[in-house]
Image (spheres, rainbow, N blue to C red):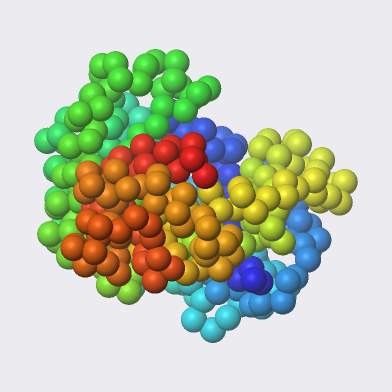
Amino acid sequence: MHPNAAYIHIPFCRRRCYYCDFPVFVVGDRKNGSNSGNIHIYLGELSREITTQVNYGAPLETIFFGGGTPSLLTAEQIGKILEQLAAKFGIASGAEISIEIDPGTFDRSQLTNYLAAGVNRVSMGVQTFQDDLLQLCGRSHTVADIYAAVDIVRQTGVSNWSLDLISGLPQQTLNHWEDSLHQAVALSPQHISSYDLIVEPHTPFAKQYNPGDRPLPSDEATAQMYRTAQQILTTAGYQHYEICNYARSGSQCRHNLTYWRNLPYYAFGMGAASYLAGSRFTRPRTTDTYYDWVAAGCHWQAELISSHERLLETLMLRLRLREGVELRSIAAEFGAAILDDLWKCIAKYQRYGWVEVLGLDLQVMLAVKGLSQDNSIRLADPDGLLFSNVVLSEIFAVL
């Protein structure tokens, strides 16, 4: 399959959030794409990398500017990157072009010009609607900034926009979480992402907190937060289409579906990971090492994915989606015998109600001793998705 998606990593942030382990470069509150030499240098190296990439022949259907804080770039800078991608690969008519934006980092003119450059989807990093929790996380914006940013989005006529929220934050209660969910719903974005905090090594949070210990919410509390998000958001009309993602009908993130369906994609920039020609490659995670790599010609030593690794990755990623795994495609690629082993992994979880087998009525399901290529499997909502790691651990241990 020819890749038709591209991820562009823009690593610059005003400050590093205390939970963040992404490859980012802190420029401070006064710097942006118009006045930062570091940003100008990086964009030059990014351009050189794009130039070296082999074109596999399909125009881009999705482009995603992630970070970092891509909204620190000017519209002219975003436009130049899009022009280069168009010249190198082509951009399909109707392509989804997304950019991550943070409250307080853009104004109406800037967003209007992003749209004029070709951006048609924005994803806003909100995280929580409590000022004390935002401060505790090291975020550079306030709740007032959130509402001001949403007003700008509405004024500019962005038709497809998303909000990001985080549960399981230090000192966060279920009441906090419910309030954030209700405020998010009231703003009526087309898409809401609801992530559970992971305390990553080498982050400020890792130095302050131990998972499972106060002031972090307990495992039971975070599980209830997950169920609460599912209840509030689906009741409000959002489809729970992926473990952490909810969308109005027709507003699923097409770019991220490329990842979850384990399809190939380009990636560019510091720390970005691509999946091309059956291999994965992650670029260096610091500016100096990334610049050295580009100067040396962007030569890859990619990790070739074996058939067995691809099977496990496909199951892991597609089971994140409510659409689940269509077994005919699994059998066609990896052999029908794999279905019996897969059934051994999931049968007990089907009895728990965590796994749903589609294409069988209840009576047949009770008697069946294996899966058919005509079946699909998916994780039940919410508890199957909530305990997905348990199910996947069993699959990884057996297959």
Where is residue 288? Give x, y as percent.
75, 36
Q: Nearer the viewer, residue 169 or 256?
A: 256
Task: Using the rendered view, name the quadrant where residue 73 is placed.
Answer: bottom right
Task: Using the rendered view, name the quadrant where residue 215 is placed.
Answer: top left
Quarter the N terminus occupies: bottom right
Where is residue 185? Give x, y as percent.
18, 57
Where is residue 108? Give x, y as percent.
38, 63
Position of residue 146 relative to residue 337, above or below, is above
Q: Nearer the viewer, residue 94 or 156?
A: 94
Question: Is residue 108 found left or right of 306 in the rendered image?
Answer: left
Where is residue 133? Give x, y as percent.
26, 31
Question: Is residue 199 found left or right of 298 in the rendered image?
Answer: left
Residue at the bottom extreme of this rendering: 93
Question: Is residue 298 found left or right of 187 in the rendered image?
Answer: right
Q: Residue at x 24, y 64 (%)?
A: 364
Q: Residue at x 68, y 50 (%)?
A: 306
Q: How many marks?
A: 0
Residue 121 seen in this snapshot = no
Position of residue 284 relative to residue 85, above or below, is above
Task: Using the rendered view, name the quadrant where residue 167 is placed.
Answer: top left
Q: Nearer the viewer, residue 46 or 356?
A: 356
Q: Nearer the viewer, residue 206 or 28?
A: 206
Residue 362 seen in this snapshot = yes
Q: Residue at x 30, y 69 (%)?
A: 359
Q: Residue at x 56, y 68 (%)?
A: 332
Position of residue 122 relative to residue 102, above or below, is below
